[in-house]
């Protein structure tokens, strides 16, 4: 008789435990839905280079979905311009786009700005010393 009561209690506590888990899951899903709704209200559609809407990322909307040999990853595409003689990076940028050919003009403009700054620094150093 005592064993039957214990079995009944175990069943009830198991059902209650399942209900509590379910309620927590529902609450978690509601929070996620609220977060998505807030994101959609605050951010417009993310447009690609060809004028079509592309996937957005709630955590980091400026990052990109890129295909690699090991699958798809979310992240940034880093570009570096290097002085091959001195083995020094003279300009670097991170882009939220996986296609390298779009970055060349932007990197060249950045390199041009860097070179102008270096010339100014060199002239200033000559004048001081």
Image (tube, rainbow, N blue to C red):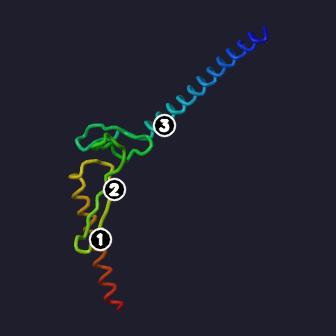
The spot of residue 46 in percent (x, y) is 34, 41
Where 57 sits versus 81, above or below? above
The spot of residue 58 in percent (x, y) is 43, 40
Give the CA separation, mark 3 to mark 2. 27 Å
The residue drawn where x is 28% and y is 62% is: 80
Which quadrant of the rendered structure holds the C terminus?
bottom left
- The residue nearer to you, when weighing 108 against 47, is 108
Name, please, the residue furthest toward the right. 2
Q: Is residue 76 left or right of residue 82?
A: right
Q: Is residue 4 left or right of residue 85?
A: right
Which one is closest to the eye, mark 1 or mark 2? 1
The residue drawn where x is 54% and y is 29% is: 30
According to the picture, the residue beneath numbered tag 3 turns out to be 38
The residue drawn where x is 55% and y is 31% is: 28
Name, please, the residue furthest toward the bottom. 129
Mark 1 / mark 2, whichever is N-terminal: 1
Give the CA separation, mark 1 to mark 2. 17 Å
According to the picture, the residue beneath numbered tag 1 turns out to be 88
User: Quadrant of the rendered structure where residue 88 is?
Assistant: bottom left
Give the CA separation, mark 1 to mark 3. 44 Å
Mark 1 / mark 3, whichever is N-terminal: 3
According to the picture, the residue beneath numbered tag 2 turns out to be 94
Which quadrant of the rendered structure holds the N terminus?
top right
């Amino acid at each position: 008789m005592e064993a039957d009561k214990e079995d009944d209690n175990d069943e009830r506590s198991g059902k209650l435990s399942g209900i509590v888990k379910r309620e927590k899951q529902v609450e978690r899903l509601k929070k996620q839905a609220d977060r998505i709704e807030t994101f959609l209200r605050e951010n417009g559609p993310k447009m690609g280079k060809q004028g079509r809407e592309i996937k957005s990322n709630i955590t980091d909307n400026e990052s990109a979905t890129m295909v690699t040999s090991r699958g798809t990853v979310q992240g940034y595409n880093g570009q570096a311009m290097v002085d091959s003689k001195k083995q020094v990076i003279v300009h670097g940028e991170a882009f939220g786009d996986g296609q390298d050919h779009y970055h060349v003009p932007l990197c060249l403009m950045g390199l041009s700005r860097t070179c102008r700054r270096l010339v100014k620094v060199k002239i200033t150093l000559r004048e001081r010393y």
